[in-house]
Amino acid sequence: TRWVYTFGDGKAEGRAEMRDLLGGKGANLAEMSSLGLPVPPGFTITTEVCTWYYDHEQQYPAELAAQTAEALAGIEALVGMRFGDAENPLLVSVRSGARASMPGMMDTVLNLGLNDVTVEGLARRSGDPRFAYDSYRRFIQMFANVVLDIDHHYFEEILENHKLDLGLHLDTELTADHWRAVVADYKARVAEVSGAPFPQEPQAQLQAAIGAVFGSWMNQRAITYRRLHDIPESWGTAVNVQAMVFGNMGEDCATGVAFTRDPSTGENVFYGEYLVNAQGEDVVAGIRTPQHLTIAGKQKNGSSLPSMEEVMPVVFTELDRVRGVLERHYRDMQDIEFTVQQGKLWMLQTRTGKRTAAAALRISVSLAEEGLIDRATAVARIDASSLDQLLHPTLDPKAERKVVAKGLPASPGAASGAVVFSAEEAETRAQRGDAVILCRIETSPEDIQGMHSARGILTTRGGMTSHAAVVARGMGRPCVAGAGELRIDYRAQTMTVRDVVVKAGERITIDGGTGEVMLGAVPTVEPKLSGDFAQLMEWADGIRRMKVRTNAETPADARTARKFGAEGIGLCRTEHMFFDAGRIVAVREMIMAGDVEGRRRALAKLLPMQRDDFAELFRIMRGLPVTIRLLDPPLHEFLPHSEAELAELATVIGASVEQVRQRAAQLHETNPMLGHRGCRLGITYPEIYEMQARAIFEAAALVAGEAGESVEPEIMVPLIATRKELDILKAVIDRVAGEVAAASGREVAYLVGTMIELPRAALKAGDIAATAQFFSFGTNDLTQTTFGLSRDDAGNFLPAYERQSILEHDPFVTLDVEGVGELVSIAAERGRKTRPDLKLGICGEHGGDPASIRFCETVGLDYVSCSPYRVPIARLAAAQAAL
Ligand code: ADP
Ligand code: MG
Ligand code: MG
């Protein structure tokens, strides 16, 4: 078996498509090398070795050693240096790289191959002992941390002490001798903590570093990240061993990271940061303030430091050329890492850049307009769920804001919340339902879960490519990074700027689009849905087959949904209209009534109110279908609870409080979810559905009489299990329709159908479709009744089910395609057999979930219906499902 793939010198054994085998980093290093871009030579040990390693008690396949030695000799031949050579030592980096990019999860060791002898060789060869010892101390610290698990703070402390003794502030001020002394102390500290001298043998260093990369696949941070991002453990990581190039050899050296387009806005401008005379992750770590790549970037961000475009114009031009090559080749925005050694550019990484939802839209739309991709690809590339970020409010421009500090606009969106200073605190408070802003000097991978729990993230150090910024953008959390005027004191639990002190728990607002930090909670406004958003949606609408409706009963929700492009209402829950103040008493009166006459009297009070509700919805949805579900919940949900409510009701119906209490007790049910609800109410109290049908038809006739088109009401009877139930209730509805038509002189076209939410209904769909003119899959209840579990109680055990992989996803979020999905398929098929033009839709929570929408497309549903804010997501997901 081939376990090792080499790259370098304009060639490579791997390709970008081999990401599963070589990991993302290795595959793209190979690809860049084949493209003729300047990549330091190296080789990739495949992810299959990682899998083999964990399958064989952390041993390696037998052929690996020879293959590695051969590949290393290949690097030596290309660069003309030898690994471990006392005079001309080859140094390498050992880098992890999984299939999916896992930023910051797996650690990299640079300058490997240095020891007490080779460091002198490096000093002589380069003529720069300072550089050699700077590299050595970096290597000791990284190797100790990654391989020997010795914390960074041991080394930071030593370095601080040296600087203090010397009266120096910046690393760059230390001389070769200073670093030599630091190195001696570092080695002593390693020996002390690990109980063994710092390993001097380069081959042993290399083996240990490779082992550490494989080992880190199972560290806690990596496991957490995989869990949060649904990355299977079985994928494994690859290891890349690559000749070092040095950005820390002097003023004509640099290291940097860049995006081929602006990752915040998606604008087609080169966006990046670099540091002169620096190595590796100095830029990301926020040790020094990075400088901008371009003059425009520098100006836009008000930086006083010179840009690379000015400082190293020749290298910058080369880098800009590489940018173009990569974009044309990958046809997408790239995130790149590079190093400049003595005026020569080296590419160290490229990958598809993470971007905000807004940037993703901008990039997809402009790449399509530039002709690099087609429209379908543009539509396919947007993560439908991420649209959520664009649909949520931003700060009200007219609202008063007390801006106390400004940082970098690292991830857009506005958020308010209570200040917390640790990731754990963010998690605990978020679990209690508090909105919090996580405020840190800087963040690290250990903070990921806290960042996830927070509404927004604020850091006082670090740039646009700092950990906080990158992770927040990925998660869609608003983030302000590097707000340097703020001083965070973790011990005192305060954040100070000039004379303002913000204590833990106080509310602040951050605007990740501008970088502003404000005191208090600032009001927000609805987002604009024009430009790229509208363009992409138009392309999506041209592709999708399924219609998208909304679940709405209030005029406000209906209007929002229309604005988001809803093509009608798929579920109007009439009971929600009954809870209004001023109505609930009439509803209770109806429930309490002991006979038909009493119920009719109370229902007569409700009729005009329901009619007005429907008329309003019909006006908003003019020309579109509106599905109205007749009363569904168990009656006892409307019962009075407090003594005051009991007393009020007693007065209205002229009974004693005791009588009211008794009637309420009679209505109590042991298992209401499976009790007296849905069409069972219609069967026992037909006058309720009669009133609702009358309200619907009168409203429809009324609106039809006004100017313009009317709506087509689709009356939906809930919880049908047998055709007979529907036959009886449809007869009631049809009779009322006839009566209203006769009285108003207006025939209103309408449909009568049912919700399929019981397994029996799904199985008997062929029968039921003889009466029903449409089915709407009520997948919330269908999931409950298929699994036989109650959604309200599932919190106690579902997490354990997910942890033990009994269920892959929460079946209430993503449709259980195998089980519930099979019932949906059966019902669709049997229903259509009886009635070929049977209209099919879904109105459960799943109607707004992209994975579930994909399933709906395969079953051939006519539409999905979801909450208003999910309508654009559903439009896009429906298009992607049709591709
Ligand atoms: P991560 O996955 O955390 O980004 P990388 O393997 O990309 O880790 O390494 C981090 C940084 O280390 C790179 O961006 C680059 O600056 C530096 N680096 C890695 N390999 C080399 C190399 N061969 N020569 C010089 N610098 C390197
Ligand atoms: Mg890293
Ligand atoms: Mg990297």
Image (tube, rainbow, N blue to C red):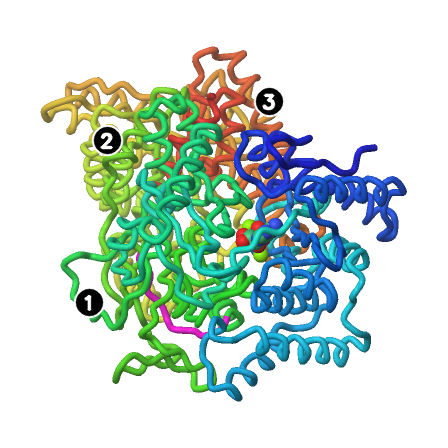
Q: Residue furthest right?
A: 62
Q: Please report whichever mark, 2 or 1, sits nearer to the chain's N-terminal start.
A: 1
Q: Please report whichever mark, 3 or 2, sits nearer to the chain's N-terminal start.
A: 2
Q: CA distance from mark 2 to mark 1?
A: 38 Å
Residue that badge 3 annotates? 826
Residue drawn 46% across the image and 39% down it? 334
Please provide percent x and percent y for residue 590: 33, 49
| Camera-nearest residue between 695 and 293 | 293
Residue drawn 44% across the image and 36% down it? 322
User: Quick check: 882 left or right of 808?
Assistant: left
Residue 730, picture quadrant: top left
| Camera-nearest residue between 206 and 243 | 243
Q: Amino acid at mark 1?
A: Arg
| Camera-nearest residue between 378 and 407 | 407
Q: Amino acid at mark 2?
A: Met
Q: Amino acid at mark 3?
A: Ile
Please provide percent x and percent y for residue 180: 63, 75
For marks 2 and 1, give the one nearer the viewer: 1
Query: Which secondary structure is most common in the magenta stretch?
Result: strand
Q: Please report whichever mark, 1 or 3, sits nearer to the chain's N-terminal start.
A: 1
Residue 787 in sight here? no
The boundaries of the magenta stretch are 414-422
Residue that badge 2 annotates? 621
Residue 115 position (above or below residue 46): below
* Label 2 packing within 10 angstroms: few (<14), some (14-19), many (20+): many
Residue drawn 9% across the image and 24% down it? 707
Residue that badge 1 annotates? 401
